[in-house]
Image (cartoon, grey):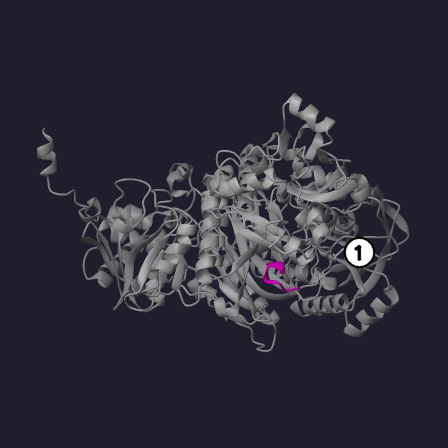
Amino acid sequence: MTDQAVTSLPPNPDPCLNVEITPELVSQHGLLPEEYENVLRILGREPNLTELGIFSVMWSEHCSYKNTRKLLRLFPTEKADKEAIGQVLVKAGEENAGVIDVGEGWGVAFKIESHNHPSAIEPFEGAATGVGGIVRDIFTMGARPVLLTNSLRFGSLESPQVKRLFRGVVSGISHYGNCLGIPNMGGDVYFDDCYEGNPLVNALCAGILRHEDIQRGAATGVGNPVYYVGPGTGRDGLGGASFASRELTEESAEDRPAVQKGDPFMEKLLLEACLEMMAIPGLVVGIQDMGAAGLTCSTCETASRGNSGIEIDLDLVPQRETGMNSYEIMLSESQERMLVIVNRGRERELEEVFEKWDLHAARIGEVKEGDRMVVRQKGVVVADLPAKSLTDEAPIYDQPTQEPAHVAQAREWSIESVPELKADGVGDALEKLLKHPTIASKRWVWEQYDHMVMSGCTVEPGSDAGVVRLSIAGIDKYLAIANDCNNRFCYLDPYKGAQIAFAECMRNLACSGAKALAVTDNLNFANPNKPETYHMLKECVTGLADACSFFDVPVVGGNVSLYNEHGKGAIDPTPVVSMVGLIEKADEVTRSFLSGEGESIVLLGGLPHELGASYYLQTQFGKKEGRVPEIDLESEKKVQEFLLSQISQGSVQAAHDLSEGGLLVALAEMLFDKNEIGMSLAIDSLGNSGRLDALLFGESQSRILVSVSDEGEFIRSAEQAGVSAQVIGCSDLTGRFKVSIDGNEILDANVSGLHETWSQAIPEIMR
Amino acid sequence: MKVAILQFPGSNCDWDAEHAVQDVLNVPAKRVWHKSGLPAETEAVIVPGGFSFGDYLRCGAIARFSPIMLGLKEFVEKGGQVLGICNGFQILCEAGLLPGALVRNDCMEFRCLNQSLRVENSNDRFNQSKFGSAISLPIAHGEGNYRADETVLAELEANAQVLLRYEGNPNGSINDIAGIRNQAGNVYGMMPHPERAVEPHHPCQDGLPVLDAFLEPIRKNNPIELSAS
């Protein structure tokens, strides 16, 4: 055959336009037959393959929240008290991230997002691109990112597979975040068999901006040019959004192309270039990152928000692979890309910024009248859809629910079923708890994160909350961040479990001296089509929403990750609560560690008495069972308000809340800063339970330990505030941890030995 | 402008260095983009930390070809004062302005912590009588393992060019080396971050005297009161 013959063939038509849309193809795209009927109705014709792909990703759970949208409406999205600090400036769901006011004309944008499925398949890249995605959401708002944290969940570290995932995830986060130069303040890490094969990797970013600099993701102004900025598009991450909306199976490893590959250097350039561009007054009309569903999502969402039409030409999209068809370009999830709409006539100003940073800035289309999203390639229209149909007409489901049997069983549980702990077993029980990777020191994790860059780190990871000074904004205020969710509680009592996650998160902020402002949540659940799962999802959301309303702490954004299942089963419900708080003055910043001798240790909230659902039951008996501790929001509020008022008066040296492991673990943790500090504890009764195990290791809620120098005054103030407070011990320089109950010594341990056990548990496993 | 803080694509401690020098030490400082020349009024240069050019190829290997490096070499030849911190230290080594090289930490992991350091008596600006024999400074690096051949190492030690050594070596550096200077005494490089230890909320403020010692030649011309020490 001659060259002549080849060139005389008609131009190769886009294969996506000629594919027959069969029911199998529809099902492979994760669309139900009735959803496809809807597509036919909206279009008035059959879609081509590219259009089918677009509907498939936009109507995936990941982008549309079709199974949770109704439930999410339960969350309060603004503050009821309009005078309080922390008013919501951009509400949940309006933009790429919510924004709250922190005073003096400054706002904070923050959000959490999951990258669970990619991290299960390819832990390093999955976790790295999870950081990249959430950081883009924040600077898209016009904010300078100031902190990162992560909420991580893994199976038991005894498994070599889990060790591989843990190591990979931590180094992926470290690799990406460190290069960006955004301090990572750690976060929480839990280990539980239920996450085996399906780890959770939730990444949070917060950024600071002036109110007047808030950007919108809307395409407005007919005739305004639409720019693509950032590196070229490749075939990586194809269909990642629909991949994230399925259960993981043994075959999922073959989905590896659906995992994106990150380049933190590109993201750093994009971050700086975008902030520089957005600082030019009146240049940017709208901006949106290309995250899940890439070019598809950013074009239809900006058009939908702007009540406009939009037209783009794929021939103008920078590409780093040859021969990509329209389906691939539209669905690619190549990283570090943005869509920007600028005012017509000012194109050069944008181009100059991106030339400086050596990044592509390609004009790929423009804002149009009407409501259509039109995509062309090689002069042919390859997609023509009403933009709003993709965002607003996504299906909404209310699934059937059924309470799982284990929830009812947990309610019926009685402490009588647990053999009592004898005094001579206390030391051993404490050591087992300190060694459990969930409780043990996470220094191995956060020493791999640069938490000091930007000169703001004020309380390093490992205390109750991470605290950064907002030096970069030139203000002497401190942003505090905490994440929480005890999956055991949520599994055994989803409503209470979610409320406890909220209460503990807020309590962690209070222990740092911070007033809680707002929440971002990451709802990690299993397959919602299973009635038991949907029941737990509904209960968790209701519990969390009720707590948010009670405390007037709104939800300003978040993420839902469903289908977290693996061959071995489903994950426990894990509604991760992340809360941002503000500390107005440097001397109100409070740590959880004792710093000297002669400090009185005061327990707020009364002696613990509930053993159900505790880590003690796990480490002693290998059981995840029992009645979840009571949570009374009124008492919680009282104890937190009292603590904050005492901190602001300068009466509190250190504060730490009781959580996993209970009283003895919390007290020991307060000693784990300097080994010479010791403590001797004298408690005069066993409390309501009459049992040593429930007193020392029960996880009763709304309990806080504080150290104070003037105990008399402190106790009097507590009485006036109606908060239960009792002095239970005193710090010294003996380097020993001594506990006596009712006059009988039950523990006398070397602090350095306990510290060693706690700090070496994870490094020893990971060695 | 007195202190030029070089900004490469991927630099991420440039703001921190500017903040420490200008807002804490009250010495005028300005970030200078790598594609421009070194401003004529430059009295000292800080090459800050970060991941210049994404650390591709090797840390600092691409930055050494940036246009501003020509001006920097000329500045050094004329006796100008240069301090490279972390990635800046790596760049100065790659550019041949300091001897040796920095390779992957022997633990194969990134390390961020407040590190104990031993101060050496290097010259009249960096010595124990100025800082005391032991200080702490934050470190944050994955490639801080200092390497040099035997001849270079012997020279460094013989000329008292080592400024700081690790107490409890975090990265495998030969002879526990954390920071060095050139023989002429005008180019300094260190893995620890003095700019992260200058304010009350930092883990310590041992970075103040270190930065101050570096800025001493500028201060001599124009004595300025320290604001935060």
Residue depicted at 55% across the width and 50% down the height: B40
Where is residue A650 drawn, in percent x and y? 79, 66
Tag 1 residue: A690
The N terminus of chain A is located in which quarter? top left
The C terminus of chain A is located in which quarter? top right
Where is residue A514 drawn, in percent x and y? 67, 64
Circle 1: residue type? Gly
**Height in image: A371 above or below A10?**
below
Residue depicted at 21% across the width and 49% down the height: A21
**Height in image: A480 above or below A334?**
below
**Height in image: A167 above or below B9?**
above
Where is residue B143 drawn, in percent x and y? 59, 35
- B163 relative to A716 in the view: left or right: left
Residue A87 appears in view: yes
| Residue A58 within the segment the image draws in magenta | no
Residue nearest the observer in this picture, A699 or A191? A191
Where is residue B213 drawn, in percent x and y? 73, 46
Residue A409 appears in view: no
What is the chain letter for disc 1? A
Q: Quadrant of residue A603?
A: bottom right
- A392 relative to A484 in the view: left or right: left
Residue nearest the observer in this picture, B88 or A87? B88
Q: What is the residue that sits farthest to the top in this orientation?
A: B150
Residue nearest the observer in this picture, B47 or B82? B82
Label 1: how many Cα within 10 Å (few below 14, some 14–19, many 20+): few
The residue tagged with tag 1: helix, strand or loop?
Answer: loop
Give, as a single range, the part of the protein colored magenta.
Answer: A470-476
Q: Quadrant of residue B118?
A: top right
Total residue callouts: 1
| Residue A472 within the segment the image draws in magenta | yes
Q: What is the residue that sits farthest to the right in this orientation?
A: A743
